[in-house]
Structures are given as structure tokens and as C-alpha cells.
């Protein structure tokens, strides 16, 4: 007896419904992975910004503290209006700090300019790319102390008496002002909304006692 053999062997496969379910699950996994990677990247970037802002604030405070420690106790302040912008200054131990509060670099040429003033403590014109003194003379050995995309929220030196320790209060914020609850002040904080990874705010207060001469 001769049997006819079927040359086609039965094959099993996925149905369209199974393929759709598998595709949906794969898409969900990819979406969740993308969100996690994005979140990790945002946290990493915010950490870098926060660290840089802390370092910037600390460097400013340390620089002022060093000049105050070895000063003769004199601390002068002044202000001047340039192009409608009020610029303030502190002078200590032959060094002048000209500054403007609440203005981000980019909206103004300079925010915190350190230089050697000579005889005058009047601040330099921070609205110019190359700052000049109120009398039109050039700033000598000047340098910007605020990092890019940042602004000063606080900068003041205070003491109770002529012989008491001096408090150095410095606040620095990174990012657009719309990302914080205020433009300036010691309580400036990031809002924690969209774009928070591009925001950082640091406030530091240091007490300095003049060293014996």
C-alpha cells in the first residue's frame, strides 16, 4: 500500500492580536526607559549646576574675606548711576567690588567686577564690555567674578561697629529669573517647575575678623 506523504509540515506562528500586544509592551518599555534616562540626565545636570553655583558663591566670599582679614579695618561703599542702572561698590584693602543686584549676565555686560580703584571708590560702569570709572578712566586689573548665566541675589558687607567682625553675605542664582520665586534676596529659591534642572540658587553668610597687624 502506498501512502502519500504531505510535503508541508504544520507551522505555528503569532496571531495579529499577539503581535499587537507584544508591540505595545515593547513600546511601553522603551517609553519608560526613555523617561528614566531623561530624568537621570536632568538630575545629573542639575547637580553640576548646583555645584558650580556653590563654588562661585564660595569663591566670591573667600576672595572678599581674604582682603578683609588683612585690611586696616576700613570699609567704604559707594553708588553711581550709569545708563539708568544703579551700580554699587565696596572698597577694602585696595580692592574695589562694583556690583549690581538681580541682573543676569547677558542682560548687562558685568555683574560683579573686582579691580584696583586707585583713589576713588565710586563703582565702574558695568553696562560696558570694558568697564570705566566715573571720571572716564579705564578700570585697572579688572575681572568678572560671576559665572555665565548667573546673577547676584545678595552682596553686602555689614558690621555693628568699626571694630566688630564683618559679615559677608553673598547670594548667587543660576538660570532665568522666571525659574525662581524672586529676582533677589536671601530667600531666592528655584520653583521646582519645568526647567528646574536649569536653575540653582545659593546663599552664604560668613563672619570675618580682622587679623592683628
Image (tube, rainbow, N blue to C red):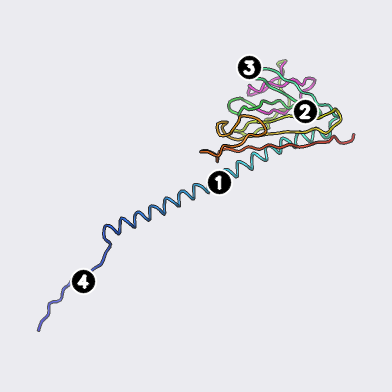
Of the two numbered discs 1 and 2 on the same chain, state the one appearing first in sequence: 1
Against 25, residue 192 (above or below) is above
Label 1, residues with CA under 10 Å away: few <14, some 14-19, many ≥20: some
Residue receiving disc 3: 84
Mark 3: secondary structure: loop
Closer mark to the observer between disc 1 and disc 2 = 1
* CA gap, disc 1 and disc 2: 38 Å
Of the two numbered discs 2 and 3 on the same chain, state the one appearing first in sequence: 3
Closer mark to the observer between disc 1 and disc 4 = 1
* CA gap, disc 1 and disc 3: 39 Å
Q: Is residue 124 magenta?
A: yes
* CA gap, disc 2 and disc 4: 92 Å
Label 3, residues with CA under 10 Å away: few <14, some 14-19, many ≥20: few
User: Which mark is drawn over residue 95?
Assistant: 2
Q: Is residue 164 left or right of residue 128?
A: right
Location of residue 207 (image quadrant): top right
Label 2, residues with CA under 10 Å away: few <14, some 14-19, many ≥20: some
Mark 4: secondary structure: loop
Label 4, residues with CA under 10 Å away: few <14, some 14-19, many ≥20: few
Q: Report the span colored magenta.
A: 111-134
Check contact, mark 2 vs mark 4: CB within 8 A. no
Of the two numbered discs 3 and 4 on the same chain, state the one appearing first in sequence: 4
Q: Is residue 26 left or right of residue 172?
A: left
Amino acid at each position: 500500500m502506498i501512502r502519500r506523504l504531505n510535503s508541508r509540515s504544520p507551522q505555528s506562528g503569532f496571531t495579529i492580536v499577539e503581535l499587537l500586544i507584544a508591540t505595545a509592551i515593547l513600546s511601553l518599555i522603551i517609553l519608560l526607559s526613555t523617561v528614566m534616562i531623561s530624568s537621570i540626565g536632568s538630575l545629573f545636570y542639575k547637580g553640576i549646576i548646583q555645584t558650580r553655583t556653590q563654588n562661585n558663591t564660595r569663591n566670591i566670599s573667600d576672595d572678599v574675606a581674604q582682603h578683609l582679614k588683612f585690611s586696616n579695618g576700613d570699609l567704604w561703599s559707594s553708588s553711581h548711576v550709569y545708563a539708568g542702572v544703579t551700580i554699587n561698590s565696596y572698597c577694602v584693602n585696595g580692592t574695589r567690588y562694583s556690583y549690581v543686584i538681580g541682573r543676569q549676565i547677558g542682560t548687562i555686560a558685568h555683574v560683579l567686577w573686582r579691580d584696583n580703584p586707585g583713589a576713588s571708590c565710586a563703582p565702574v560702569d558695568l553696562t560696558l564690555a570694558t568697564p570705566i570709572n566715573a571720571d572716564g578712566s579705564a578700570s585697572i586689573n579688572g575681572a568678572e567674578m560671576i559665572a555665565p548665566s548667573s546673577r547676584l541675589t545678595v552682596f553686602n558687607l555689614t558690621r555693628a561697629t568699626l571694630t566688630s567682625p564683618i559679615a559677608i553675605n553673598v547670594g548667587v542664582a543660576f538660570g532665568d529669573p522666571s525659574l525662581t520665586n524672586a529676582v533677589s534676596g536671601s530667600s531666592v529659591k528655584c520653583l521646582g517647575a519645568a526647567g528646574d534642572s536649569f536653575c540653582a540658587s545659593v546663599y552664604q553668610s560668613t563672619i570675618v575678623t580682622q587679623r592683628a597687624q
